[in-house]
Amino acid sequence: MAGLSILLLGCSATSSPTAAVSSNTASAGRTGPVISPPPVTPPTPPGTNLPAFACQDAAGGSAGIVGVTAVRVDQHAGYDRFVLQFDSQVPVYTVKRQAKPVFTQGASGQPITLSGTAGVLVTVHSASQSGTYSGPTDYTQAGFPVLKEARLTEDFEGTVAWGLGLGSPACMRVFTLTGPARLVIDFVTTSS
């Protein structure tokens, strides 16, 4: 253990205001120097630095081959949420709004209609979920204000797509998170 050395200069046995303060400090129960820690800025609480809701399509991510490890839907005060979680990073993605909740079922090309009156197609590239995700591939959320259904529409040749059926057209915010890597899409449920 390293020692702490204190060098006192100009100390004398005579009483001085400084000695009195030190004496009072010692009598208050302190036995050593008072060290004040440097000021620290507290971390930003989660959820306070999110992007604004926008009524437009979104794209992003980075190149790399990934596996989908989890899919979640959730309801929060003011928004409904859809999340894709990945095993390494968020791959290249697009999030496109549609006037109707009608999607094409993978390589078969068969049309499927989800619950709701509007839709959003979430597509991730260089991805697969067949070997990394074993959960549900169709979430029906009749009680949610906006997000009514989320269904896997494609997992073929490096493309994973999820169709989202919305109860009404809604603005969204799209962002990514790390630890673990996630693509998050929120749909506003209250008017601003």
Image: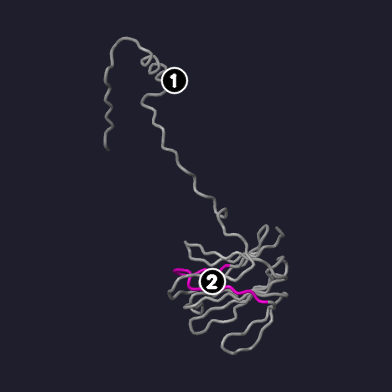
Q: Is residue 89 magenta?
A: yes
Which amino acid, by three-letter code, is at mark 2? Ala
Q: Amino acid at mark 1?
A: Ala
Q: Residue drawn 54% across and 75% down?
A: 134
CA–CA distance in space, label 2 to label 1:
62 Å
Give the x, y percent position of residue 9.
Answer: 26, 20
Residue at the outermost top position: 14
State yes or no: residue 93 in magenta. yes
Relative to residue 82, is residue 189 drawn left or right? right
Q: Is residue 15 left or right of residue 39?
A: left
| Local SS, label 2 | strand
Residue 86 percent across, percent down from the top left: 49, 70
Magenta region: 83-98
Q: Which residue is mark 1?
A: 28
Residue 131 place in picture, x, y as percent:
48, 78
Q: Which residue is mark 2?
A: 59
Find residue 68 and report its horizontal and vertical position in percent: 51, 73
Q: Is residue 118 left or right of residue 21?
A: right
Residue ID at (60%, 59%): 52
Q: Say above or below: 30 vs 98.
A: above
Looking at the image, tell me whether mark 2 or mark 1 is earlier in sequence order. Answer: 1
Label ID, residue 139: none
- Residue occupying image coordinates x 57% and y 59%: 51
Magenta region, main secondary structure: strand
Is 13 located above or below residue 81 in the figure?
A: above
* Residue sitting at x 73%, y 67%: 143
Q: Nearer the viewer, mark 2 or mark 1?
A: 2
Is disc 1 placed on a helix, strand or loop?
loop
Badge 2 density bin: few <14, some 14–19, many ≥20, Cα 10 Å = some
